[in-house]
Image (tube, helix red, strand yellow):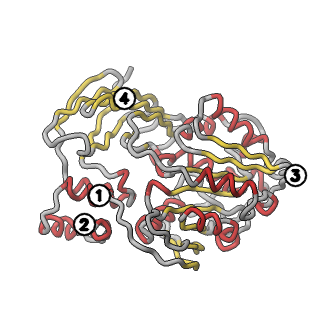
Amino acid sequence: MTPHEARALCLLPDRTAVLAELRHRKIGVTALRELLERYEERPWDTWSGVVELDDEHGRRTDMAVHVPPYTPGRRLGALIVLHGAGGSGEQVLPYFSALGERLSLAVLCPTAQLPAQRSNNLDVAGIFGSRFRMPRWDLTGRDFVPAALRWARTELGADPDRCALAGVSMGGLATWNLGMRFWHSFCAAVPLNGALSVWESFGTDARTRALLPNTLPLPLFVVHGGADEQIPARFDRESVDTLRALGHEDLRYEEVPGGGHGLETLGLDADGPLFHRLERWLGRTYRTPRPAEIHHRADEDRHGRAHWVGVDGIVPGKAAEVHAVRTSADRFEVEVSGARRIALHLRGDRLSPGATVGVSVNGAASSVRFAPDLPTVVDSYRETADPGLVAEQIVHRAVPER
């Protein structure tokens, strides 16, 4: 069975039939996990067009797509681009097609829709007006961005470690927020004329800003027009200054003199100086798989996971914080605040079946026998279609009170 066949099999609707077929073929836990994560070079066809994309609510939207010409020996990645208020995926695609061709990145540009539920759109009203009733991006990741990421992995076979996110204006706001919440899913983020939070027009948005340190492991290339009057550059300057003070190791900030709010004013034309700087920078970014140390903050259970650790039971209105370290192949030390439970997503790349795994949560030590499980591998892949997030066993622990 090839990696492509293994991924397609795991995603079939009938989970029982999937497991039966794997057992019939005598594909065990380790073999399946290795198949799912192995990159398979498969030539692709260059094309441009519009496809339909479904989100988790069953809503549909159009997504403009440009797949670059095949380059032998180079892995296909993906660049998801989010348009601004009043725009569409088809409108923004031409600005990024050349970048995709230079870097072998499929450019995916979904079109935002009205919220799935009634909303006052307060997260964008501060900039776009109190009566803003236009389609928008869900800043907590409940709409088409995760759907586009999944589509890139499953339909195009894009390398999960070469998937980047970019957005302009309202899309830049979403890029910051999705990058903070799901930093482990992307190799880089490029917010253009965006902001961390529009509420900072009135003062510090402490709740959103508490999540900003999540982007420390995420390469960032921030662009803002120096003459932008709709979203002033000071929003991005403050976030960049904060991250630099925290020691961000791969952060670029480009403020374009005279650049306005429109994307066409930022000088990102192919072969322009800023284009070349972005090209060189983005071309070397890759996601770090399964880091040994993780710092993550979350203000809701939905984005409580980062790589191999997750938290849930988050106290409403507060940000949970987890610091997890894999101190050796078979030992994990976790410090947690603001959440009731943790989950460790274990896999056998450094563990043997039957090994005793030590887990310390806020100083409370316990152990568990590593017992790889085929349904866990299948289910964890089906959840995200991301081989880097596949688990062979999930260990849950309550967080003891301090």
1 and 2 marks in contact (CB < 8 Å): yes
Q: From the image, state whether disc 3 or disc 1 is nearer to you.
A: 3
Q: Position of residue 119 (x, y in %)?
A: 63, 57
Q: Earlier in the sequence, mark 3 or mark 2?
A: 2
**Residue 363, quarter of picture:** top left
Viewer-side residue, 254 vs 373 = 254
| Residue bearing mark 3 | 258
Query: Badge 1, how many Cα within 10 Å: few under 14, some, many 20+?
Result: some
Amino acid type of disc 4?
Val
Q: Earlier in the sequence, mark 4 or mark 2?
A: 2
Classify mark 4: helix, strand or loop. Answer: strand
Q: Position of residue 350 (x, y in %)?
A: 25, 40
Whole-angstrom CA distance, mark 3 to mark 4, is: 48 Å
Q: Residue at x 72, y 49 (%)?
A: 223
Whole-angstrom CA distance, mark 4 to mark 2, is: 33 Å
Amino acid type of disc 2?
Arg
Q: Earlier in the sequence, mark 1 or mark 2?
A: 2
Query: Badge 2, how many Cα within 10 Å: few under 14, some, many 20+?
Result: some
Whole-angstrom CA distance, mark 3 to mark 2, is: 56 Å
Whole-angstrom CA distance, mark 1 to mark 2, is: 8 Å
| Residue bearing mark 2 | 15
Quadrant of the image containing the C terminus: top left
| Residue bearing mark 4 | 334
**Residue 345, quarter of picture:** top left
Viewer-side residue, 82 vs 43 = 43
Whole-angstrom CA distance, mark 4 to mark 1, is: 25 Å
Q: Earlier in the sequence, mark 3 or mark 4?
A: 3
Q: Earlier in the sequence, mark 4 or mark 1?
A: 4
Whole-angstrom CA distance, mark 3 to mark 1, is: 50 Å
Q: From the image, state whether disc 3 or disc 2 is nearer to you.
A: 3
Q: Position of residue 173 (x, y in %)?
A: 67, 51
